[in-house]
Image: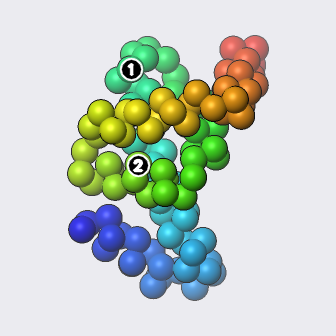
Amino acid sequence: MRLLGIITATVLLSGCLAPEAAVQQTARSAAKGVINTVISQKLPGVNAEPYVDCIVDQATTDELITLAKAAVTGIDNSTVNIVITIASQPETISCIAQNGLGVVLG
C-alpha cells in the first residue's frame, strides 16, 4: 500500500514525465534497491552496483513492479528467484560480463 502511495505521489508531482514514465522510473528505483540487497545477501563481499543496472535493464515491467513491491513487503524466495532468472538471461550475462570487466580493469 505504501508503494502505491509513493508511485501515485511521484506521478502527481511529476510535471516533466508522462505518468507511465514516472511509474516506470519509480519502480526501477525501488527494484534496484531490492536487487542490490539480493545480490549482497547471495554474494557477500561482491560489489553489486555494476550488475544491478544490467538486471533492471533486462527485467520486464511486471518483474520490475514485483521487485519494487518487495521493497515494501520484504524479500522472499520468489523475489530471489526473479533476480536469478533475470540474471541468467543471455543478454544480462553479456551486460554483466562487460560491466564486471570494466570494474575490474578500471
Q: Quadrant of the N terminus?
A: bottom left
Q: Quadrant of the C terminus?
A: top right
Q: Decide: is 76 above or below 23.
A: above
What amino acid type should be assigned to the residue bearing mark 1?
Lys
Image location of residue 2, percent across then percent down: 26, 66
Query: Which one is in front, 26 or 103?
Result: 26
Q: Decide: is 23 above or below 98.
A: below
Residue 29 appears anywhere in the view = no
Q: Which mark is residue 27?
A: none
User: Could you say whether the residue bearing mark 1 is in a helix, strand or loop?
Assistant: helix
Q: Identify the residue under disc 2.
A: 67
At a point 49% along the width and 57% down the height, the residue shown is: 62
In primary-sequence order, the first of circles 1 and 2 is 1
What amino acid type should be assigned to the residue bearing mark 2?
Leu
How far apart are the two marked residues, 1 and 2, measured between alpha carbons? 16 Å
Q: Residues within 10 Å of mark 2 (few under 14, many from 20)?
A: many
Left or right of 21 on screen, residue 64: left
Q: Decide: is 24 above or below 42.
A: below
Image location of residue 48, percent across then percent down: 51, 27
At a point 51% along the width and 33% down the height, the residue shown is: 85
At a point 30% along the width and 33% down the height, the residue shown is: 77
Q: Quadrant of residue 7?
A: bottom left
User: Could you say whether the residue bearing mark 2 is in a helix, strand or loop?
Assistant: helix
Q: Which mark is residue 42?
A: 1
Q: Decide: is 16 above or below 49.
A: below
